[in-house]
Amino acid sequence: MHDQVASLYPHHLSTLRERADQALALGGFDHLLIAAGTPLRKFLDDQDYPFVVSPHFKHWLPLTDAPGSWIAYTPGRKPKLIFLQPHDYWHVVPEAPHGYWVEHFDIVLVRDAADTLAALPAGRRAVIAAACPAIDGVEANNPPAVLDYLHWHRSYKTRYELMLMREASRIGTRAHRAAEAAFRAGESEFGIHLAYLAAARQTDAELPYASIVGLNEHGAVLHYTNFARLPPARSRSFLIDAGASAAGYASDITRTYAAPQAAEFQALIDSVDAAQQGFVAKVRAGQSYPELHIHAHHVLADVLREHGFIRMSAESAVESGVSSAFFPHGLGHPIGLQVHDVAGFQQSERGGSISRPAGHPYLRMTRVLEPGMVVTIEPGLYFIDMLLEELRTRPVAADIDWARVDSFRQYGGIRIEDDVVCTSDAPENLTRDAFAQHD
Ligand code: GLY
Ligand code: MN
Ligand code: MN
């Protein structure tokens, strides 16, 4: 894996250089400056929040722990890494850069902000940074023309990026296996979470997002992150949405499990799983993602009907909003350097926005799929008290089997989420391929 990543890196870097050349020309700039960023300080405290590197920075090189460092790129020149290694005996100072990528950069080691400032090229600078000033003496300008161009093209992953995303999926699925075993052993949510972290060999702060680990009814809370410290009297069901990182690239994986005695819930999981695999098969070049989302509503409405929850056609369930009460989020989103990657709504490399279909406010991806894009496919069916109470007051409630619905509240809900690469041919399912490697 490491050798392959190394051999793919030069092409990745030349792709980024070409994109940067175009973006700078569009915006009328001479240099692209990218700040790694610095950790945020807690209010009235001397402690920092965990450092999260800028996605633009880790796009160029596999460094996620380099606070205060910069990349400076000038078209036609070797990119420069201005690497901050402060004199500090309180913290672990980032190691001097090493590895397969260093030969592709001019590396300047700096000890403080004054050195950094002196090492940054002068001229018309596109400065990409979260804070302003990015460093005393340099204002971040985040030029929209530059960002729009870079974000648009970030949707198309290089082979180097796909290699790292496969690795992120392998780490995530290994940890998911450990989490399932902990569930089967009757662990608490907290215990399952610890088993996940141990198997991933990543800290909470290194994961691409906060893990969702929900037993029983907690599966109905879409972003449940409480980690109950004690196990429930009986674990009937388990929903885990947790990913992993590889050199700054994310995986985003959800699985739902039933206890052996919860056969009716397992049957529903099996139906959602089959539906999900059908949606994954449609991740093909030319497929409109919002149309796939609407299609998912129809298929899931059929699942609800087949399992006796609703007595109406899929069409009327979708039209009346019934399907949205059970599937109240989007089918998925772009993924890459960020779990919810940029440009999901973007109209072109010049910016613009493609709006969501009416009635689907949580969809995070409105583009047509093209080769090189990576998206999640994460349909779900949930029994959410708030949404069911609302549904109960509507005329369409007469066509719902409430006794059956109520009997499933104890399981919370189901979500099944894979990360899928659109190619010029059949899709590549990063998640299922990775799970298959652990069998
Ligand atoms: N884990 C966040 C998501 O699935 O989008
Ligand atoms: Mn997701
Ligand atoms: Mn997820």
Image (tube, helix red, strand yellow):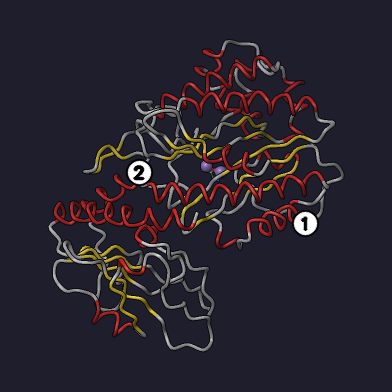
The image shows residue 155, relative to residue 95, as above or below, that is above
The yes-or-no answer for disc 1 within 8 Å of ligand 1 is no
Nearer to the camera, 77 or 362: 77
N-terminal-most mark, 1 or 2: 2
Circle 1 sits on which residue?
229
**Element on which disc 1 rests:** loop
Q: Amino acid at mark 1?
A: Arg
The spot of residue 351 in percent (x, y) is 25, 43
The spot of residue 133 in percent (x, y) is 29, 72
Query: How busy is the neighbourhood of tag 2: few (under 14 within 10 Å), some, or many (20 plus)?
Result: many
**Element on which disc 2 rests:** loop
Measuring 41% from the left and 74% from the top, which residue is drawn there?
A: 97
Q: How many marks?
A: 2
Measuring 47% from the left and 87% from the top, which residue is drawn there?
A: 88
The image shows residue 270, relative to residue 51, as above or below, that is above
Measuring 35% from the left and 43% from the top, which residue is drawn there?
A: 155
Q: Label for residue 155?
A: 2
Q: CA distance from mark 1 to mark 2?
A: 39 Å
Is residue 137 shown left or right of residue 50? left
